[in-house]
Amino acid sequence: MDQKQLQSLADFYKKQLLEDTVPFWFPRSYDEENGGYLLMRDADGSLLDTDKAVWIQGRACWLLATLYNTVEPRQEWLDGAKLGYDFLLNKCFDEHGKMYFHVDQEGTPLRMRRYFFSETFAVIAFAAYAKASGDPQAAKNARDLFGVCMEYAEGERKIEPKFENTRPTKGIGIPMIMINTAQQLRETIGDSRCDSAIEGWIKEIETNFVKDDIRCVMEQVALDGSIVDHIEGRTLNPGHAIEGAWFILHEALYRNKDPKLIDLGCRMLDYMWERGWDKEHGGILYFRDVYDKPVQEYWQDMKFWWPQNETIIATLLAYLVTKDEKYAEMHQQIHDYAYTHFHDKEHGEWFGYLHRDGKVAQPAKGNLFKGPFHLPRQEWYCWMTLTKFMKP
Amino acid sequence: MDQKQLQSLADFYKKQLLEDTVPFWFPRSYDEENGGYLLMRDADGSLLDTDKAVWIQGRACWLLATLYNTVEPRQEWLDGAKLGYDFLLNKCFDEHGKMYFHVDQEGTPLRMRRYFFSETFAVIAFAAYAKASGDPQAAKNARDLFGVCMEYAEGERKIEPKFENTRPTKGIGIPMIMINTAQQLRETIGDSRCDSAIEGWIKEIETNFVKDDIRCVMEQVALDGSIVDHIEGRTLNPGHAIEGAWFILHEALYRNKDPKLIDLGCRMLDYMWERGWDKEHGGILYFRDVYDKPVQEYWQDMKFWWPQNETIIATLLAYLVTKDEKYAEMHQQIHDYAYTHFHDKEHGEWFGYLHRDGKVAQPAKGNLFKGPFHLPRQEWYCWMTLTKFMKP
């Protein structure tokens, strides 16, 4: 890609973010009465449900504060971020400090789940809001909650297990989310724990999840890193592993283009593009079996929005750090597929759920699992990163 | 349908059951070494996983014992049922008498879940095996475990809740499974608790789940029977409600064609056929929204095998008890759709998971959720019921 192409791509992502994606969600989703955001919306933006998904409350707060921190200090975004910050802080924790998964409009709890992703998204929300507001208490809350997440991730703080201990496994999700959470914390308010923690989690992924001999990144493995040859153990999540790839490429950039990390991130991207790209219809498939056996999860060959977002970022970043035209071509393929099939030209934003053949399966823009995160993060990250690389 | 058509349909189901479906699974699935069955199989019957799903171990044991009791006293089936009975009894209960959901080949537990469907399927397995073997201990075990299920269903025995108590709901699944479990118990070894219990659960469904004003059967409701207008509360499961419809029609037959129960079962079938039948591609869709809003569950518009099986039974039974040709036509539609799209002409049995347009999404015949139950039960039940109705 030449400078002109890079500039045109940066302009495209900026325009999509600020004139299409963000205006779909805001200001109409601010819940001025109860705090937080009303994000469960149909294709046209009408409200499907007043409930609040705690993951997505955190992610939306992060987005608003990040726009304020990095795009422009628009008061609406700061006020909007504060709505989410206060709601998360005051409504989404139980009496033991564990965060809920699903609450109602007023913040009354509906469901607690046995993992700590609500907490990781609250960390990045608190950290970004702390930077935007300058509130030292928000910074302290972000750091304290990051400490809690570290304890969960290291097993020092226990969560009731969903499985017996017969065949213990570990997932790539924990090191991945911890890398990203630490990166966000470091880039907003800074935290001396982040560098070495990130180092350790990347090592964990490289050692236990990346299988060069079969060109694969496993989604879960036995505690010693071996493949668990049962249906669940064989199940790959290419879009997720590709998200992990760009977290590592992002770290490579932070470390002055560390060639080892560039190589690791690009290997992960290469392997899981081979596994996940649908050669027949385009787009990244949801699940695959490591040995190409049938996948049990029902939606295994659907196209969801977020694996495409993560692959758009990963291929662009791989291109920018390596200048290998292979990645520019992959980026163009996934970009064209995604904006052709997912983008709602009528109402803005993206549909979330396509059939394998690219038809829209259901048109909601927001629900318990989808909200203003993967798409606006992709558009924001690509725009910002292109801008950084185009600097003379 | 005239007598000749009924006979030809009975012959078809008998032939499919005994020459296609059952031979796909047995004898190859008997685990002579560890007990139980190896049922997680690919399209061609090769083994995908040695793990055992406790629901399906119970269902397969029920099937084998039922074939022995009602088709012919084939020693293979009795020996096969004993493999499952012993495995369930000796391997699938924890120290508190709660049954696991998922165990490995040897029966070492992998996962406990927070509901009691493993128990209900063990009741029908134990009861059918008790009748087949004449073993009084098996009969006692069936009755004792049915008592445990009654305590769970009535809330006297507690299961750790998955949700906070903010917006309590109840599902149609509990009264439905209890009706069928009690019917099976009554028809194998008899139990004096069954008649009045079934009466109560049917009343519960009629009063709280069947909504004549909007021609709908709800999958879940608030404790007072009102509709919970949030995404999950609005989600309908037409194939499941249609299964409930035929349990009630079956009860109508038992009670000398009770006209009130025939009317209730036919209303439930009518309403949910209207909601679930795919007018564009044929077949029963998985989930629908009561107000036609987008459904959140990812596989909502896929075609799964079991809703088709339950609808084949329900439409046939509705026809046989009412002689209304409308139901004969519905039966022909669903029968033709299902045997055209789901039946694997090469290897036998049915695929489980089709895209909305009827293409096979993944070809496994068995996994954690699919095994020898809905299809062979449908073929067996339709054959037996047709035979009963053709008697002079």
Image: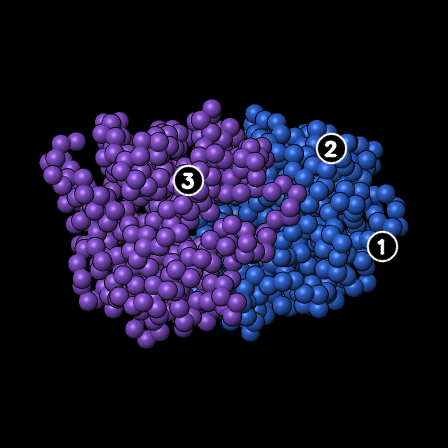
Chain colours: A purple, B blue
Residue B102 point in image, percent of width and height: 65, 45
Quadrant where the image shows the C terminus of chain A: top left
Label 2 marks which chain's residue? B
Of A131 and A373, nearer the camera is A131
The CA distance from mark 3 to mark 2 is 45 Å
| A299 lies above or below B150 | above
At mark 1, the secondary structure is helix
* Residue drawn at point x = 59 percent, y = 67 percent: B206
**Where is residue B27 drawn, in percent x and y?**
73, 29
- Foreground mark, 3 or 2, reads 3
Q: Position of residue A183 (x, y in %)?
A: 34, 49
Q: Viewed as shown, does residue B160 lie left or right of A243?
A: right
| Contact (Cβ within 8 Å) of mark 3 with mark 2 | no
Q: Residues within 10 Å of mark 1 (few under 14, many from 20)?
A: some
Do the residues at pointers 2 and 1 share their chain? yes
* Position of residue B374 in the picture relative to residue A283 (left or right): right
Task: Say which residue label 3 marks.
Answer: A202
**A245 vs A113: above or below:** above
Marker disc for residue B30:
2
Mark 1, chain letter? B
The answer to whether dots 3 and 2 both sit on one chain is no
Give whichever of discs 2 and 1 has the lower sequence position.
Answer: 2
**Amino acid type of the residue that numbered disc 2 sits on in the rendered structure:** Tyr
Residue type, numbered disc 3:
Ile
- Residue placed furthest toward the front: A192
Dot 3 alpha-carbon crowd within 10 angstroms: few under 14, some 14 to 19, many 20 or more: many
Numbered label attached to residue B140: 1
Q: Residue at x 59, y 51 (%)?
A: A162
